[in-house]
């Protein structure tokens, strides 16, 4: 089934009206199979000396935490608890800061710990937003055959969480949305992707 739905993030204009910030076609969002291929290919490339450990951690965290690029760049070493596998993410909203927690992938844990030994100071990634986008473009083109934006990995994560847990409140908390209505848009995509299962379930024999 082709994906032609649109994910649209809104911002509030000067007069209080919500205006489109960015439109992202669902067909631009990778499937979870593609995400798995991307991360496993990054791990293989790193082990073969074809990709730096930093880039593996950037791609891996974007893909497996649903973190925004701005949040990724705020990460500190102390935000990672390797005992509980919890990452504390600083989320900026207007002039305030909020913290939420997410899970560190077991597949990524050893690589993040190894990366921490290579960096000085508390800041995890000394990168700009443009550099993160370039890293994402480089490896998605290389391993998936098409450029995928960093934010599209966040959408793929949210859809995957809903597919596997069917818990919209959990998904909201993990990706850091304040409104359930924003998360509900992903439900349409998880349902559309399982139309065959639904059709088979209601078939009259």
Image: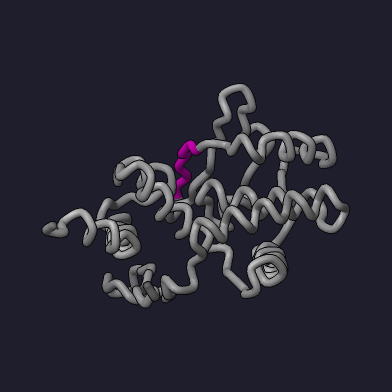
The chief SS type of the magenta part is strand
Give the residue displayed 37% in from the left and 77% down from the top.
4
Quadrant, the N terminus: bottom left
Residue 199, image x, y percentages? 22, 61
Residue reaching furthest to the right: 49
Residue reaching furthest to the left: 204
Give the residue displayed 66% in from the left and 40% down from the top.
108
Q: Is residue 135 left or right of residue 65?
A: right
* Residue stretch rendered in magenta on the structure: 96-102
Residue 73, image x, y percentages? 64, 52
Q: How many marks?
A: 0
Q: Is residue 105 above or below residue 68?
A: above
Please name whichever residue, 190 or 111, is drawn nearer the observer in this view of the structure.
Answer: 190
Q: Is residue 182 visible to us here?
A: no
Please name whichever residue, 94 or 200, is drawn nearer the observer in this view of the structure.
Answer: 200
Give the residue displayed 40% in from the left and 55% down from the top.
159
Residue 179, image x, y percentages? 29, 52
Q: Is residue 87 left or right of residue 175?
A: right
Residue 201 found in image quarter: bottom left
Quadrant, the C terminus: bottom left
Residue reaching furthest to the front: 205
Residue 50 found in image quarter: bottom right
Q: Is residue 68 visible to us here?
A: yes
Residue 53, image x, y percentages? 79, 48
Give the residue displayed 82% in from the left and 35% down from the top.
117
Please say which color scheme the image uses. Answer: one colour
Residue 107 found in image quarter: top right
Question: Magenta segment: does it hold 32?
Answer: no
Residue reaching furthest to the top: 83
Q: Is residue 146 left or right of residue 9?
A: right
């Amino acid at each position: 089934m082709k994906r032609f739905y649109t994910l649209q993030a809104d911002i509030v204009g000067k007069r209080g009206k919500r205006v489109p910030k960015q439109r992202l076609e669902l067909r631009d969002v990778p499937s979870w199979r593609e995400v798995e291929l991307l991360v496993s290919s990054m791990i293989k490339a790193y082990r073969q000396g074809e990709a730096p450990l930093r880039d593996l951690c950037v791609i891996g965290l974007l893909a497996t935490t649903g973190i925004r690029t701005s949040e990724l760049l705020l990460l500190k070493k102390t935000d990672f608890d390797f005992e509980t596998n919890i990452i504390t993410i600083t989320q900026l909203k207007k002039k305030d800061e909020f913290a939420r927690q997410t899970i560190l992938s077991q597949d990524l844990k050893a690589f993040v710990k190894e990366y921490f030994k290579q960096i000085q100071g508390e800041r995890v990634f000394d990168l700009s937003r443009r550099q993160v986008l370039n890293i994402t473009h480089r490896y998605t083109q290389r391993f998936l055959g098409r450029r995928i934006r960093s934010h599209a990995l966040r959408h793929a994560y949210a859809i995957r969480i809903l597919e596997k847990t069917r818990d919209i409140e959990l998904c909201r908390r993990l990706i850091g949305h304040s409104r359930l209505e924003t998360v509900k848009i992903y439900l349409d995509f998880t349902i559309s992707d399982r139309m065959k299962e639904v059709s088979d379930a209601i078939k009259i024999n």
